[in-house]
Amino acid sequence: MDDAPGVLCVHAHPDDESISTGGVLRLAADRGFRTAVVTCTGGERGEVFGAGMDPAEVGPRLPEVRREELVRALDVLGAGPPRWLGYRDSGMAGTDGNDDPASFWRADVDEAVGRLVAHVREFRPDVLVTYDPYGGYGHPDHVQAHRVGLLAAEASAVPALYPQAGEAWRVVKVYLATIPKSAIAVWARELAARGLPSPFEDVGHVDHIPMGTPDEHVTTVVDVRAVLDIKMTALRAHASQLAPDSFFLNIPDDLRATAFGAEWFARLRSDVVVPDGEDDLFAGLDHR
């Protein structure tokens, strides 16, 4: 097992791992591959949405609650115990949390990269996944995870950098988890047509959508329908973050596979030859 291929996903908060990479993590685990998730913050500034949860009671202990939720979700996904980078949630863009010196957004980047390099060198993944430059939807912690993740993916291979973080390790493939802009436009239209709550603003032309990646830059689409029920079980483990009317809980059955049955990535770097129309983050690794 120690020499099996491995994937390390770098995420901002508990629940992000299930939303954007839950399928690829479970598929990899089912193949006997090594899987792990580094979570950069504890999600301390998340709101309490869960059915039957009293925000006044749950709020003060939200970090503990979210840690427990992450343990359960990672167990469902076969992704091992939590790995923490150790920063506080920065809150949404423009909120007071952005100014918290302990927040991930305010972290010393060199220090944060060193912390992540230690995880990379210890786990020794073939594949590293983080977010696109906009962090998916512009959350400061997601944007910071993109920066720190890419720097750590490269720095981990250089022995002279962060020598205290362990023996150098070269990540073979680096990916950015994202969503094609065309998919966002389809979801927004379908949900609006059905009068359902949507996480997306009204959109016209796909070029006007602030989040997501132009379709031509999406290199890799992984079909996760075979583990979709497991992915959704992992997401439901984050009960504090899911309101009863959540988009994730109320998607119509006929849209469920369309919305959640694929995970998209932009391949940033690969040291091995990969096929056109790549559908597997581990493609090409057998040919090293």
Image (cartoon, helix red, strand yellow):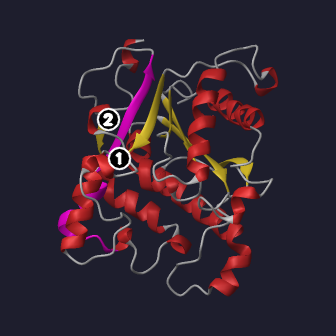
259 in relation to 161, above or below: below
Task: Residue 244: give x, y in percent of width and height.
Answer: 42, 81
Q: Which residues are magenta?
A: 250-270
Q: Nearer the viewer, residue 153 or 127?
A: 153
Q: Is residue 159 left or right of residue 248?
A: right
Give yes or no for residue 264 being in the magenta stretch.
Answer: yes
Query: Mark 1 belongs to which amino acid?
Result: Ile
Which residue is labeled 2 in the image? 218
Q: Nearer the viewer, residue 65 or 139?
A: 139
Dot 1 falls on a residue whose secondary structure is: loop
Task: Residue 119: give x, y in percent of width and height.
Answer: 67, 35
Dot 2 falls on a residue whose secondary structure is: loop
Query: Mark 2 belongs to which amino acid?
Result: Val
User: Is residue 257 something that shows in the picture?
Assistant: no
Would you call the spot at circle 1 few (<14 residues within 10 Å), some (14-19), or many (20 or more)? many
Give yes or no for residue 114 being in the magenta stretch.
Answer: no
**Could you tell me which residue is drawn at 32 percent across and 74 percent down?**
250
Q: Is residue 56 left or right of residue 208?
A: right
> Are discs 2 and 1 less than 8 Å apart at CB?
no
83 in relation to 265, above or below: below
Which residue is labeled 1 in the image? 179
Report how many numbered discs are placed on residues in the image. 2
